[in-house]
Each structure stands twice: as structure tokens, then as C-alpha cells.
Image (cartoon, rainbow, N blue to C red):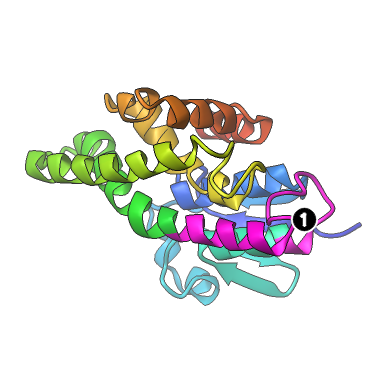
Amino acid sequence: MATPVKVYGPPLSTAVSRVLVCLLEKDVPFQLVPVSMAKMEHKKPDYIKMQPFGQVPAFQDDDITLFESRAICRYIAEKYPNKGTMSLFGTNPLVKASMDQWLEAESQSFIPPSSVLAFQIVFAPRMKLKQDEALIKQNEAKLVKVLDVYENRLGSSQYLAGDEFTLADLSHLPNTQFLVEKTNRAELFTSRKNVSRWWSEISTRPAWKKVVEMQNA
């Protein structure tokens, strides 16, 4: 029996949860290895050997070690094309190109403002840090522009890369979950008809619901 792949990091991490939902979508057995960020375990020498930047997640598949969640997801989806959700990596060259295009949009345009908002609104108060209202306002305006583009795109296709659920949609799950469920900015998504429909569809997928259960355990 093959050894399950290992994912190192806490499920509350957006990058870790991105990898977990990908594994669940592909029905790939895995072992989640806890890494205590509070105890700085991600900065210890043995961990740095797997993840040279000292971040989470790290990923092991037998003698292969990877880091960076989107690269890990691409590896999983391409290694197991006939398992689980087969559309995840795109079913033809055009869909794959579209998927890569929207993954770039996610990492370059969506993640920066959504991450700032999640940190400032959710995590700063927990860490007893003062919220930067100017930064919140600035990044909310940036996110509005991104979501307007998404609204237009999702008016002509069911998902971002076309009419199949791909990594482009999956990659948006972690940050959007925080903004919709943990902040008072849910209307940024729910007030847009097509974005709201899209979010409802991707966030209720069994794989993501399982990840949320892991986060809340």
C-alpha cells in the first residue's frame, strides 16, 4: 500500500487549506502533520530543509518535497488526472490556459487585497494590534475592482476558467471563506449576482466543507 502524502502545517492556514481541499477533491489519501507556528516550528532546521523560506505548507510524496501551495496543487492534479474531480487541471489546452490565466489573477490581483483585509479585520484584533483603517479602505477598493471583473466573467461562464470547476476556482476558497464568514465584508461577494452564485457553488462542495470541519475541530 502506498504511503500517504504528507502535508505540514495548520489547516487554518490559507495556503495549507488550499492543498488540503485539492487532495480531497482528487481523493488522494494524506497525512496532516501539525506545525506549531506559535512555537516557531516552521523555523527549525529540520523544517527549513523541506521549506527553505520557513513557511507553510511543506509537502512530501515519498522522496519528493515541494512547497508553495499552488505548485503543490498543480502537481497533485496532474499526477492523479483520473482520480476524484477530473476537471481540476483542465480537460483541454484552452481550459488549462484559461485556468492558468485566472490562477495568475487570483495570486496577483485577488490575494493581495483580500489578505490585507483578512489580516486587518480578523487577525489584528486577535493579536491586539491596532487596525489600519486607511489600509482597509484602500484594499477594499482594490478588491471591489477585482470582483467587478469576476462578476463580468462569471456572467458568461459557470466557473472562472469555463464551465468546469478547476484549480482557478479552488484557489479562491481559503481567503474568500475568511472574508465571507469571519468579517463584515460578505456583501462584497453576496451583492454581486454572479459572484454570489459562484461562491455558493464552490463553497458547498463536499471537499471544502470537510476542510472547514478540520479548521473548526
**Amino acid bearing label 1:** Pro
Q: Image check: 182 left or right of 170?
A: left
Query: How many callouts does the rendering have?
Result: 1
Q: Which residues are magenta?
A: 78-104
**Magenta-drawn stretch contains 156:** no
Residue name at image x 21 percent, y 40 percent: 140
Q: Image check: 95 left or right of 169?
A: right
Q: Image check: 128 left or right of 79?
A: left
63 over 178 or under it: above or below: below
Element assignment for label 1: loop
Which residue reaches farthest right? Answer: 1
Question: Where residue 29 sits: x, y (%)?
Answer: 77, 49
Which residue reaches farthest front? Answer: 156
> Residue 128 is drawn in which quadrant?
top left
Question: Where residue 105 sits: x, y (%)?
Answer: 42, 56
Residue 38 visible in the shown view: no
Residue indicated by mark 1: 4
Question: Where residue 211 sits: x, y (%)?
Answer: 59, 36
Residue name at image x 67 percent, y 30 percent: 206
Along the line of sight, the residue nearer the viewer: 211 or 136: 136
Question: Where residue 15 sits: x, y (%)?
Answer: 48, 52
> Residue 93 is drawn in which quadrant?
bottom right
Which residue reaches farthest left? Answer: 134
